[in-house]
Amino acid sequence: MKRMSLALSLFLLAAPLAADLPAAGEKAPAFSLPSQEGATVTLEQSKGKWVVLYFYPKDFTSGCTVEAHNFQRDLAKYEKANAVILGVSLDSVDSHKGFCTKEALNFKLLADTDAVAAKAYGSLATSGDKPYAARNTFLVDPSGVIRKVYVKVSPATHSDDVLLDLAAFQAPK
């Protein structure tokens, strides 16, 4: 009985970290975060463009590097589709700056050091007692509405998947 009570207590303590994911069709939660250049970036600044808002666990790790490289590889395709890429993790501005320099990334990485955006997007996870951003992505349309939610994505194929969906959303009906 004590074990179940302890497990329940731990679950309840962790529960506030994992908010519900916003769903397709909902207004995307606003945020204001510093980029690797130290400039403040908001969702509002991208109004009129599609936004690929991707959350990832940590700079300089293998899966996150693969995912970032693939978004960088496809950056011209996103720009042609009137889309911007914004990566978000709990890492610092300095970490993002180093990661962008080392990996030659030319899109914005946002430092969510207080996990405000990760919580708003239901993308805050923990490993033991260490919080991190879960690998989730939100495709936001030019009016600020979430059109697609990707959960626990595969870093190797994710950019291709997002580009296919973006093309489908933009295709004449």
Image: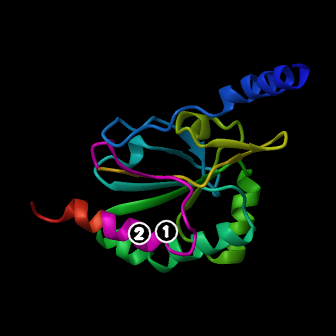
- Seen from this angle, which residue lies furthest front? 1
Classify residue 4 by image quadrant: top right
User: What kind of residue is marked 2?
Assistant: Asp
Frontmost residue, 146 versus 23: 23
Secondary structure type for disc 1: helix
For residue 158, the mark is 1
Residue 146 position (above or below residue 53): above
Kindly report the distance in space between the C-alpha atoms of the residues bearing marks 2 and 1.
Answer: 5 Å
Q: Quadrant for the N terminus, please.
A: top right
Amino acid type of the residue tagged 1 in the rendering = His
Nearer to me, 59 or 105: 59
Q: Nearer the viewer, residue 5 or 78?
A: 5
Secondary element at tag 2: helix
So how many labels did they put on this image? 2
Q: Position of residue 60 (x, y in %)?
A: 75, 68
| Pick the front one: 37 or 155 | 155
Task: Please name the residue shown 62% across and 75% down the image.
Answer: 66
Q: Which mark is residue 161?
A: 2
| Residue ranking furthest to the bottom | 73
Q: Quadrant of the C terminus?
A: bottom left
